[in-house]
Image (cartoon, rainbow, N blue to C red):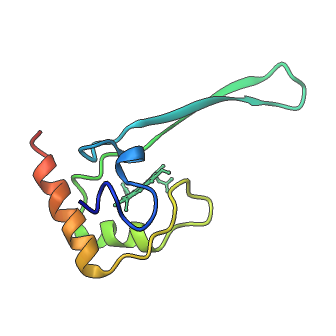
Amino acid sequence: MLYFNPRGIGCNLCHGDTGKGKFITSYKHKAKNDKELKTITIASSDITNIDFKQFSKSINITKSKSIMPKYFLTTEEIESIYIFLKTQRSK
Ligand code: HEC
């Protein structure tokens, strides 16, 4: 399935096997004065419940500061991932 094996890193690794979002990582951010240690947590949001337009835009046009890699998928490929995620919604 494309969701697990697109041309690039699998979506499931960051979005979870059902697309409901996943805790990715957290790390301590070291500030200049060493006293302000901040914990930064990165997690992805639920992608089973967004509309197709927003969905396809997020995949092929990625903001430069995004954690998510850029993909070059065809409309058909994006559609098939989208349909797959809809079936995961109720799980
Ligand atoms: C390296 C981790 C990573 C991978 C791999 C990844 N994503 Fe993401 N994705 C994210 C993060 C983090 C966000 C949250 C917004 C941001 O940082 O741009 C996101 C946001 C999104 C959004 C927008 C959600 C919204 O609410 O607007 C969609 C849709 C999406 N991803 C779909 C996918 C699909 C489909 C794939 C596989 C082809 C994929 N992602 C692979 C990390 C990832």
Hey, which quadrant is residue 51 in on the image? bottom left
Query: What residue is at 41 percent from the left and 68 percent from the top?
Result: 7
Location of residue 22 (image quadrant):
top left
Q: Is residue 40 visible?
A: no
Give me the residue at 29% from left, 52% from top.
Answer: 47
Residue 85 percent across, percent down from the top left? 20, 55
The residue under the point 55% across, 66% down is 63
Q: Is 30 situated above or below 6?
A: above
Residue found at the far right of this picture: 33
For the N terminus, the image quarter is bottom left
- Give the side of residue 9 with respect to residue 12, left or right: right
- For ligand 1, the image quadrant comes to bottom left
Locate residue 33, reporting x and y percent.
Answer: 90, 26
Image x and y of residue 71, in percent: 45, 70
Q: Residue at x 50, y 57 (%)?
A: 68
Q: Quadrant of the C terminus?
A: top left
